[in-house]
Image (spheres, rainbow, N blue to C red):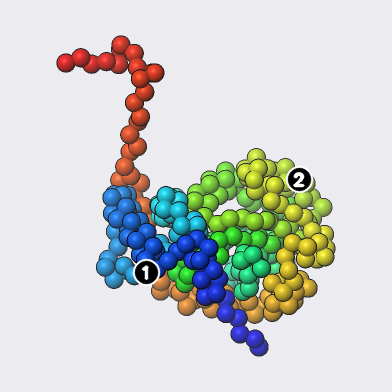
């Protein structure tokens, strides 16, 4: 059985550092700037000294995701802790060992493929094991996605963009009807800031006959940009025009290993990081302590009624 080195890919890390001008001295300086800013935000969690190295490395990951943009990095860090407060169910890690062996976990396959595309992107893949929707929970998609992305944040970000590949052969209208669309829109809004990835494309493989119905239901809740980056593939040949076959698993005509093995690799990674997930679950924002933004003063809107004369 081949060995899959899922993360991190050091060559890709070096490439990103070079592309974004992330020298060792610049990283140290920028990380220190973000850490200093965090201390001025009373709603953000405070960390013990034992976590200093971990947090510094974590911030470095945000710098890669944002192309070394300090303001976007601050926004990403802040949004991450706010997301944990707003959607605690996505960050539930009370019993990961039993969770990864549960029928709920087995029903949904969600993985990142081991290899990058030639332009340095990763492939996020998911599907359902059968058409029976009694085990389907929309929250599972969000939870599994964040488990993978947080592991990348911990181990070292080696990409900034992704292709999302969804095999929809087992998706039914019963699955679609279970989505809380307002929750979905709110979650996407915050998650895009908390995990600032560039979505290159979403590929719907083997779309069902009711796909137009699903599109019309989801369209008001998804941005125009995301919809523009949506492709439908009735066969593998059209998928290969977008994603090289040496990045795909053999189940999709590729040469990059077996999907079941990749799936087991990710189960192992999640379990290996169980203690880390548990140690970080309580670090979230306290929205009651968030600093209020000062209203800007405008002479144009000033009237005599607003003037107070000493």
CB under 8 Å between discs 1 and 2? no
Using the image, tell me which numbered label, if any, was put on residue 213.
Answer: 2
Q: Secondary structure at mark 1?
A: helix
Using the image, tell me which numbered label, if any, was put on residue 54.
Answer: 1
Residue at horizontal 63%, vertical 73%?
Answer: 115
Q: Nearer the viewer, residue 194 or 200?
A: 200
Residue at mark 1 to residue at mark 2: CA–CA distance: 45 Å
Q: Nearer the viewer, residue 210 or 68?
A: 68
Q: Nearer the viewer, residue 135 or 55?
A: 55
Q: Is 93 situated above or below 261?
A: above
The crowd level at tag 2 (other Cα within 10 Å; few <14, some 14-19, many 20+) is: few
Quarter holding residue 81: bottom left
Residue at horizontal 30%, vertical 11%?
Answer: 304
Relative placement, left or right, of 307 versus 216 is left
Using the image, tell me which numbered label, if any, was put on residue 103.
Answer: none
Q: Quadrant of the C terminus?
A: top left
- Total numbered badges shown on the rendered structure: 2
Residue at horizontal 35%, vertical 56%?
Answer: 34
Q: Is 88 situated above or below 273?
A: above
Q: Secondary structure at mark 2?
A: helix
Quarter holding residue 299: top left
| Location of residue 110 in the rendering, given as x and y in whole percent from the top left corner | 62, 67
Instruction: Work out whether residue 92 can be spotted.
Output: no
């Amino acid at each position: 059985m081949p060995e899959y080195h899922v993360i991190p890919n050091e060559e890709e890390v070096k490439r990103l550092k070079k592309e974004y001008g992330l020298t060792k001295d610049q990283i140290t300086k920028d990380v220190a700037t973000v850490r200093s800013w965090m201390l001025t935000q009373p709603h953000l969690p405070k960390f013990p000294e034992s976590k200093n190295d971990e947090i510094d490395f974590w911030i470095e990951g945000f710098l890669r995701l944002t192309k070394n943009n300090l303001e976007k990095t601050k926004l990403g860090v802040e949004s991450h802790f706010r997301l944990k407060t707003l959607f605690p169910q996505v960050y539930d890690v009370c019993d990961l060992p039993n969770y990864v062996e549960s029928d709920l976990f087995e029903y949904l396959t969600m993985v990142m493929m081991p290899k990058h595309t030639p332009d340095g992107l990763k492939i996020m893949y998911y599907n359902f094991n059968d058409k029976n929707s009694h085990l389907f929970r929309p929250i599972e998609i969000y939870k599994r996605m964040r488990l993978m992305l947080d592991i990348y944040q911990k181990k070292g970000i080696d990409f900034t963009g992704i292709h999302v590949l969804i095999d929809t052969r087992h998706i039914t209208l019963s699955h679609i009807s279970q989505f809380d669309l307002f929750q979905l829109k709110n979650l996407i809004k915050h998650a895009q800031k908390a995990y600032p990835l560039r979505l290159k494309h979403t590929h719907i493989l083997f779309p069902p006959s009711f796909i137009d119905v699903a599109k019309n239901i989801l369209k008001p809740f998804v941005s125009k940009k995301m919809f523009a980056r949506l492709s439908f593939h009735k066969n593998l040949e059209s998928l290969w025009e977008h994603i090289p076959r040496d990045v795909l698993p053999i189940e999709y005509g590729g040469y990059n290993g077996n999907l079941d093995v990749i799936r087991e690799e990710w189960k192992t990674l999640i379990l290996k990081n169980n203690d880390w997930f548990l140690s970080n679950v309580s670090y979230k924002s306290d929205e009651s302590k968030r600093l209020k933004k000062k209203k800007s003063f405008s002479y144009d809107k000033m009237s005599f009624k607003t003037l107070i004369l000493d």
